[in-house]
Image (cartoon, rainbow, N blue to C red):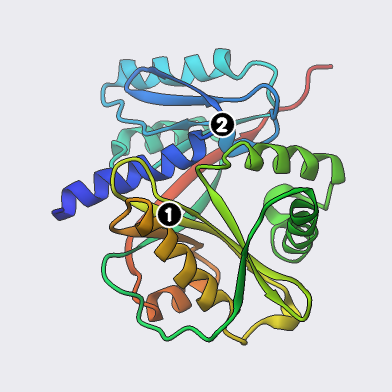
Amino acid sequence: MNGSELLSRACETIAGYQALGNERFEAHSATFLRNAATPRRQDANSVVLIRSESQAEIEALVQLAETAYAGFGHRRFEVDALTPAAVGARLTLEGGFKIEEILVLVLEGGLQASPREVEIREVSGEADWAAYRRLDERWWRESNTAYFGPYDADLHAELSRSFRTKSPAVRSWFAWVDGGARAYLSSWPGENGVGMVEDLFTEKEYRHRGLATALIAHCVADARARGAGPVLISADVNDTPKQMYAALGFRPLFVNRAYRRLIEPPP
């Protein structure tokens, strides 16, 4: 596929991944995602694939978000590579939004690595999901308090429920070492020929042992076996994994920007 087609399909794949398990509806040249059962999962309750161009349509979009997410504790708009610049300008004018920047990279050929032999197990059954949640708690406490705040067990349970609704389309995998799960990553083939691998984490004590590379190789192969060609991976623009992904053959494609604002609860 050519560059513009890849970019369009990549944007669709990222939004499609977020939409799995959630209600979606189209309005004002955008897609609204919503899930009343997991109201604090921000990417499950957000506006994506925004293609609104006129000032009137952008205003209608912003106003509809107030109605569609009434009672929710946040507003979230995702500005991707194809979102008209006026959308981000309008949100900036309103103010109160924090911007989260995520670098999206794509692998179009083979992985530039020779992964070590690692036991890879698919996450399956309640015992595995309990192990996944244990690792996920370590990820939160170590690296993502800036996004979610201090660790909150109730919120973590809600986020975990939301993530599990993506299964079986999304498969999650462990790197299994020394009798336990030490790293995880998920794979999804997408719906348009562009897949994703997502949510990589390795326990600190098991880093630099090739677990992440082995998982990436396995998950890319799984996504491609289920119909993907190009495969996406994402990284925080300020974090170091982006360099590892580039060394493995992923090339930078675009920066995704999520505008998110917390809403004070009613008195």
- Residue at the spot of label 1: 196
Mark 1 element type: strand
Quarter of the rendering containing residue 253? bottom left
Ranked by sequence position, the earlier of labels 1 and 2 is 2
Residue 132's label in the rendered image is none
Q: Can you give x and y, in whole percent of width and height, for residue 117 in the image?
A: 55, 84
Q: Residues within 10 Å of mark 2 (few under 14, many from 20)?
A: some
Query: Which residue sits furthest left?
Result: 2
Q: Is residue 96 visible?
A: no
The three-letter code of the residue at mark 1 reads: Met
Q: Quadrant of the C terminus?
A: top right
Q: Can you give x and y, in whole percent of width and height, for residue 30 in the image?
A: 37, 25
Quarter of the rendering containing residue 39? top right
The three-letter code of the residue at mark 2 reads: Gly
Seen in the image, is 114 located left or right of residue 212? left
Q: Who's the residue at 40% across and 65% down the image?
A: 221
Q: Can you give x and y, in whole percent of width and height, for residue 113 in the image?
A: 40, 84
Please state which of residues 5 and 255 is positioned toward the viewer in this rendering. Answer: 5
Seen in the image, is 243 located left or right of residue 172? left
Seen in the image, is 59 located left or right of residue 5? right
Please state which of residues 212 and 78 is positioned toward the viewer in this rendering. Answer: 212
- Residue at the spot of label 2: 21
Q: Residues within 10 Å of mark 1 (few under 14, many from 20)?
A: many
Q: Who's the residue at 47% across and 42% down the image?
A: 17
Residue 111 higher or lower than 262, as above or below: below
Q: Who's the residue at 79% across and 76% down the image?
A: 179
Mark 2 element type: loop
Q: Is residue 248 visible?
A: yes
Q: CA distance from mark 1 to mark 2?
A: 16 Å
Please state which of residues 47 and 156 is positioned toward the viewer in this rendering. Answer: 156
Residue 70 higher or lower than 99, as above or below: above
Q: Can you give x and y, in whole percent of width and height, for residue 241 in the image?
A: 52, 73
